[in-house]
Amino acid sequence: MYYVGAASESVEQDEKHSYGMAYGGGGFAVSYPAAAALAGGIDGCLRRYDRLYGSDQRVHACFSEIGVPLTREPGFHQVDLRGDIYGLLAAHPIAPLLSLHHLDYVPPISPLFHSQLQALRSLINATRADQPRALQQSFCYLHERRLNWSISVSWGYTAQIYPWLLSPKELEVPIRTFRTWKTSDIRHFTFNTRELAVPSRPCERPLRYFLEAVEERREGTVTEYRRHGWGDEGKERCGKLGFEAMGAVKKVRVTASRMDPMLWRKAPRRQCCGAKKNDKNIIDVHVRDCRPGEITSPI
């Protein structure tokens, strides 16, 4: 019997309600045997727990009586967050994207659009071309002409370019562009975060690009990402060599074969990629299955 879902992203919510509960806004799934066991005693269980706040708490309490624990699936997102959730979406776990809740409480997920609905349509259009790959993150490195760049792609959503080398261990950690749900705290999340440098330190910030176009081809997809700032830039500009070269890059173009949905039935692994800079100041990235024995390393 399985009870599958995810907890809140904010520690304060989990401490108040439960770390072991599937939060209802993000959604949850139950196996047929679990649903049958739940249905057999649901009326009495609901009466016993009528004091609880929401239906997700009551379902959790009923499963506790049955003895079925939560199986955590990181693709469910309660989005108990305030502010820009860009950092969360740009570093999605290696898991299928299943849900996004509370999107009416946060700004549009892409600054290329004026409304959340328009921004979500952009993401959904990409997922129609390759649903299993939505938001899947890949890392690659560009070493040429005295350049040492780190590139992160969250497929169907965004790309980031760093004019320095960052390890996968660092790149997989979300940039903290958001706050907790109730208290707007910047520390207490149920996952690690990393700081975005303040606007007065532009040389310590990556450039970011957002999905602009999706093209389906017989062998896969081509997605293009257009550069957009962080929205809080000041007058300071970074004059370092790597940044000046990076500033000329207006687009990132990503090619990928369609992801086999059956891969999610296996132990998950991040896909690999390669990158090169063409003469039109476009970074071309090719996302692919990792070769046997292949690792992703900046060195």
Image: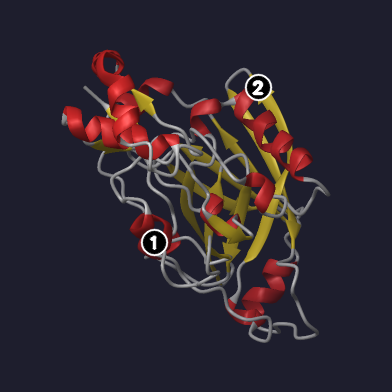
How busy is the neighbourhood of tag 2: few (under 14 within 10 Å), some, or many (20 plus)? few
Assign the N terminus to one quadrant of the image: top left
Compared to 245, does 110 lie above or below?
above
Q: Nearer the viewer, mark 2 or mark 1?
A: 1
Picture colour scheme? secondary structure
Instruction: Tell me the quarter of the picture where residue 37 sits.
Output: top left
Report the residue at 38% width, 64% height from top: 192
Q: Residue 225: where, in percent of width, then height? A: 70, 47
- Looking at the picture, tell me which residue is in the foreground, 222 or 42: 42
Q: Residue 123: where, in percent of width, then height? A: 66, 37
Cα distance between the residues tagged 2 and 1 = 43 Å
Instruction: Tell me the quarter of the picture where residue 221 sits.
Output: top right
Given the image, on which type of amino acid does mark 2 rest? Arg
How busy is the neighbourhood of tag 1: few (under 14 within 10 Å), some, or many (20 plus)? many
Given the image, on which type of amino acid does mark 1 rest? Val
Q: Residue 280: where, in percent of width, then height? A: 77, 53
Compared to 277, does 271 lie above or below?
above
Q: Which residue is mark 2?
A: 217
On residue 131, the disc is none
Instruction: Tell me the quarter of the picture where residue 20 sits.
Output: top left
Can residue 105 be seen here?
yes
Mark closer to the chain start, 2 or 1: 1
| Secondary element type, mark 2 | strand
Can residue 267 be seen here?
no
Q: Which residue is mark 1?
A: 11
Q: Residue 131: where, in percent of width, then height? A: 54, 27
| In the image: residue 210, left or right of residue 29 | right
Q: Residue furthest right?
A: 114
| Secondary element type, mark 1 | helix
